[in-house]
Image: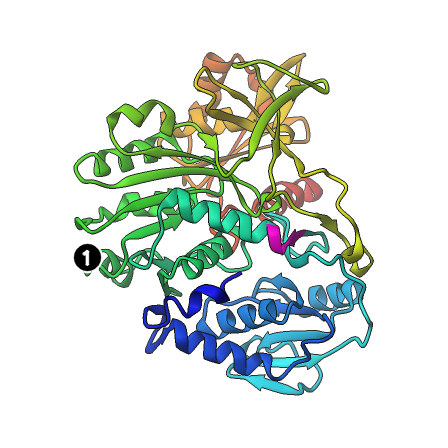
Amino acid sequence: MFFKNFDRFKNEVAIIDNDIQKKYKDLHKDINKICNIFDFKKRKLCFLISENSYNFIKIYLALIKLNYVIILLENKVDNSTLKKLIDKYMPNYLFIPNDLNLNFKSFFKKIDNYLIYKDSILKHKFNDDLQLLLPTSGTTGSSKFVMLTKKNLYKNTNDIIKYLKLNKKSKTLSNLPFHYSYGLSVLNTHLLSGAKLIIYKDTLISNNFRNFFKQEYINCFYGVPENYEILKRLNLNLKKSFKFFAIAGGKISKITLNYLLNIVDKQNINIFNMYGQTEASPRISFSCYKNTKDKKHIFTSGKTFGGGKIFIKKDGKKIKKNQTGKIFFSGKNVMLGYANSYKDLKNKRENNYILDTGDLGYLDDNYNLNIVGRDDRFIKLDSERINLNDIEDKLYLNFRYKYLVIYMNNKINLLSEKKKSNESEIDFLSATMKIKKNYLKVINNVKFHYLSNGKLNFLKIKKDYLITNSQNG
């Protein structure tokens, strides 16, 4: 996928990792060194634990060049989870950073800080097109993975490059983890377009982060909505060389998006509001803001690109514009399928390149996609259908605090980091959404935990503040 362009960009800087600066010709040379350790003739299954580093990148690319099948794991994986996954998938090789201290058996090779372990001698049967397995979005420790093919990855990577107009002058940070489909997509698109990627390991709330904008080290930035909440507090002074902000990984609040619009209106900066899923390799649609005439549709998820199509269904039938239903996507970037063990790696495609996204939404008069929410974020109370995401949005707009709304034990639990509350949220929702007060419960002083990809760790928060408390009570 990448290697035909490496000669073309050979003298351009590809990766900067602290004091390490590698041109594309250096990267290609390092990839070939790794490839020489392994057998090109037989495909192998590899566990690769991710970290944001040059060492990870060259190993990841070497395994692609070897045509091995890669399962990417996050670097917070623990011993018990890793052993469970090994039993399920029986990898031939494991690539583990030595600072993880997983107390694993003796390794047979070392590549910089990565230790390589031989594990199973199983001769795996693979689907010929299978290349990469990624965790399903939002899961931690699950044995369920999304299976992506070489064609999936190449198709979506090329289409994103064209849409964002990436080239060898593009420069960004790797602030998103590489095991996360969004973070990996940033890596793939920047390498395939000859752009520059700066490895970033610090927090976003730091002078170091501000300097990347101030000193013009980067000219584009990718983040999830929570990242942009932080940017809003930093009051960044963007230079004329800055090109765009790209948003994905969830719905950004109108307040934060309006803040970005106020910034970019003063300069020639674009905003891309993107929708996607790991199962779509990962990008499905974009809306783009270039000037004020785009303000209406930047709050939508925009239109598909690269030949993909969206259609909305209700009760199994396609429905017309402005009617809410289940969102389906058809495109050549749709995954091969799901895997739950090594036995699934040989599976043939059965989805006909059609993805049931699990999201609800509608196409407006301009055929822009509008996301209403996840199907599992709707509940029924007294025969009334209620969108929990709507409650979060209304609370944020009115109280200027982030809320997490979880339905459990016949209660709509309103969790926030506010120290104290007079429970005015209950009065507000009762008046504006006609929800009975006895269904509402306010929980204050909540510590919002986050996943490594920047999204809220929904399961941990639920366990800490709802499941544990209900068991104790």
Residue 273: quadrant of the picture: top left
Q: Is residue 38 left or right of residue 257?
A: right
Q: Is residue 143 left or right of residue 461?
A: right
- 236 and 444: which one is in front? 236
148 in the magenta segment: yes
Percent x, y for residue 362? 54, 21
* Residue 422 visible in image: no
* Residue 397 visible in image: yes
Q: Residue flagged by tag 1: what amino acid is it?
A: Lys
Q: Is residue 238 left or right of residue 82?
A: left
10 Å crowding of disc 1: few (<14), some (14-19), many (20+) = some
Percent x, y for residue 211? 23, 61
Residue at the spot 62% in from the left edge and 86% down from the top edge: 109
369 in the magenta segment: no
Question: How many numbered marks are there?
Answer: 1
Q: Which residues are magenta?
A: 147-151
Relative height, residue 402 to residue 436 (above, below) = below
Relative height, residue 395 to residue 71 (above, below) = above
**What residue did someone put label 1 on?**
214
